[in-house]
Amino acid sequence: MKKIKKQINTDVVIVGSGVAGLFAALCLPEDKEILIITKEDLKECDSFLAQGGVCVLKNIDDFNCYFEDTMKAGHYENDPESVRVMIESSPEIINTVIKLGVKFDTDDDGDYDYTREGAHRQNRILHHKDETGKEITATLLAIASERKNITLVTRTTMIDVIERDNVCYGIVCEDELGENAAIIARDIILATGGIGGLFNNSTNYPHITGDSFAIALMHGIELKDMNYIQIHPTTLYSKKSGRRFLISESVRGEGAILLNENGERFTDELQPRDVVTDAICKEMEKFGTDHVYITLPNMTSEEAHRRFPNIYEACMEEGYDITKDKVPVTPGQHYMMGGIKTDINGCTSMKHLYAVGETACNGVHGRNRLASNSLLESLVFSKRAADLIAADNSEKSADIPFVDPDDYPEKAVREKTFRKLIMDEIKRKDKAFYDKWCNNENKR
């Protein structure tokens, strides 16, 4: 048997350092050696950017309403079992992250300050100002950094999986110097996020380019709903290149309104995201513009700065006081509802390969994600994947397939190939969506 050059061995390798990857690592037994690799720096993941909040089932009386809100937002294409599992698991999961040290905002009486966003009929969203994702991710990262069984490696990119007979044995990765190596592990968890980096207009970090999806297509790993890509209605309009700044739906949940070029309100701002996006697109087409406006007239500058410090300051940097001015906004790519098909435990169609977070498609979101369900989904299903890995005592062959880590195309060629694979799959699934949102968007 040939020995792989530049080989690293571990129990579990996790690709991605966002909420899903970190929480999976923390839920695994501490006697397992865990290696987490991330494409850029540890904090350059979309989980850090999540503004609005995280949903939770406050009491059993809200179950049917929460379930229906999630299903309706997803156009009833959701998997009902996945939705049930997520909602029923939410109280325990949220209590766990609170015990780990995550802080959520409270009201004057010290009770949690639940808010609501578009398509929610009840206030069920916990938040930490307008940086909920940052609060959760930073807390998990601090704990993971202290765990002796967890190693975090930055600026390292997965470029392939190692498999034979539909069993995954590890991954091939490339470091920042362009050196390749094989990471051999009993279990592999993909938590690489979505595809925003393939779009010119996205709220995602530009390096998040759907690598897991391209690799899945190359190896016949089952995908689901790759054309179900959420366009967020309100990103801060700018002619500058780079990532678009998100103006969270929670702003509209607190009373912000949308105005067209004539200063007229034109839609119900608390409808599902895709409905609001369509309404904005119609107004832009009607007036021949590439943006509409948002304003928050029911708050003072001080109140807005206290509730939405990050958003308020970002708007001020562009010269707008969101409580007094009309702030230009435009739709932008935001979230991937589709992805690598999994069951409710994160299992993919390949043995010993798991997918969690935005990379996975367990059907919980359907065609359109309900606001603030993403962080909850990442937490719930990454824990289930970790629990299944911990309980798996099955035998796995020690006969590792041979790969030559140096036998891969250079970065530029690989990225072009990956991009084409993904965009061709989206086009195959939904040409109308591709023509409207993807065509030429991937040419950076």
Image (tube, grey):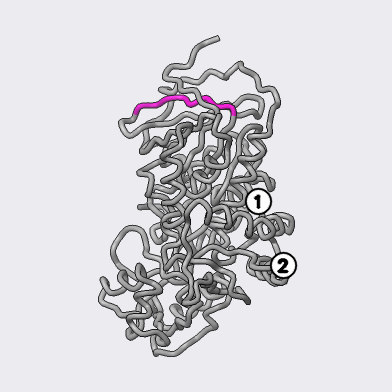
Q: Is residue 107 above or below residue 210?
A: below
Q: Residue at x 67, y 67 (%)?
A: 75
Q: Which residue is the site of mark 2?
A: 60
* Mark 2–mark 1 CB contact (< 8 Å): no
Amino acid on which disc 2 is placed: Ile
Q: Nearer the viewer, mark 2 or mark 1?
A: 2
Whether residue 280 is visible to the viewer of this picture, yes or no, is no
Specify the quadrant of the image occupied by residue 350: top right
Residue farthest front in this picture? 109
The prevailing secondary structure element of the residues shown in magenta is: strand
Across and down, in percent, residue 187 comes to 59, 31
Q: Which residue is mark 1?
A: 362
- Residue at 37 percent across and 65 percent down: it is 245
Mark 2 element type? helix
Residue 91's spot in the image, x, y percent? 63, 59
Task: Identify the residue at image location x=38%, y=58%.
Answer: 200
User: Which residues lie in the magenta part?
Assistant: 179-186
Q: Earlier in the sequence, mark 2 or mark 1?
A: 2
Q: Closest to the observer: 157 or 213? A: 157
Q: Count the marks: how many?
A: 2
Q: Residues within 10 Å of mark 2 (few under 14, many from 20)?
A: few
Cα separation between marks 2 and 1: 24 Å
